[in-house]
Image (cartoon, rainbow, N blue to C red):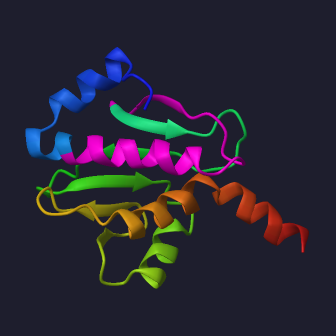
């Protein structure tokens, strides 16, 4: 895993400890998932709206993934662009694996085992979202 940029580390530290710890696990999974797919390329780790965000600037392959929390929740939140079909796709594939909020968030409990297999699929779909969309348009 690449070292945490200072400002991103501060953002994780500003979260309640259980949420921050869970989201650091998700961060590791984001980088591992990206590294497993050559089409994704190197990720840009930055802040968007004060929250850790992961972008595929190098290849443009995916949609931004943000990590944080929702105001009305004690769970860790993985946030996606609400104009994408990502959450609908996740709901179809994993209706009972996660809690979802509208078209923008996948929520994770802060305790218990991280559902790495299912989450890796979701993260991979986000990191290759534009490649998948381009492929559908070309058909």
Q: Position of residue 22 (x, y in %)?
A: 21, 48
Q: Quadrant of the N terminus?
A: top left
- Give whichever of 16, 27 is nearer the camera: 27
Say if the magenta span includes residue 70.
Answer: no
Vertical arrangement, residue 53 with respect to residue 109, above or below: above
Q: Quadrant of residue 118?
A: bottom left
Q: Quadrant of residue 15?
A: top left
**Taking 123 as reference, is 10 left or right?**
left
Magenta residues (range): 22-50
Taking the spot 16% from the left edge, 29% from the top edge, the residue there is 14
Q: Position of residue 128 (x, y in %)?
A: 64, 56
Spot the residue most to the top.
6
Vertical arrangement, residue 104 with respect to residue 54, above or below: below
Taking the spot 62% from the left edge, 34% from the top edge, the residue there is 42
Vertical arrangement, residue 56 with respect to residue 78, above or below: above
Taking the spot 48% from the left edge, 46% from the top edge, the residue there is 32
Q: Position of residue 18 (x, y in %)?
A: 10, 45
Spot the residue most to the right.
138
Say if the magenta span includes residue 43.
Answer: yes
């Amino acid at each position: 895993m690449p070292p945490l940029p200072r400002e991103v580390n501060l953002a994780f530290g500003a979260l309640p400890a259980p949420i921050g710890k869970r989201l650091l696990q998700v961060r590791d999974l984001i980088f591992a998932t990206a590294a497993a797919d050559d089409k994704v390329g190197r990720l840009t780790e930055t802040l968007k709206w004060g929250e850790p965000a992961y972008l595929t600037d190098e290849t443009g392959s995916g949609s931004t993934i943000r990590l944080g929390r929702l105001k009305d929740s004690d769970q860790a939140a993985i946030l996606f662009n609400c104009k994408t079909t990502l959450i609908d796709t996740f709901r179809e594939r994993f209706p009972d694996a996660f809690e979802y909020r509208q078209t923008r968030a996948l929520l994770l409990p802060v305790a218990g085992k991280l559902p790495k297999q299912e989450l890796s699929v979701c993260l991979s779909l986000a990191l290759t979202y534009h490649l998948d969309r381009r492929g559908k348009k070309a058909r």
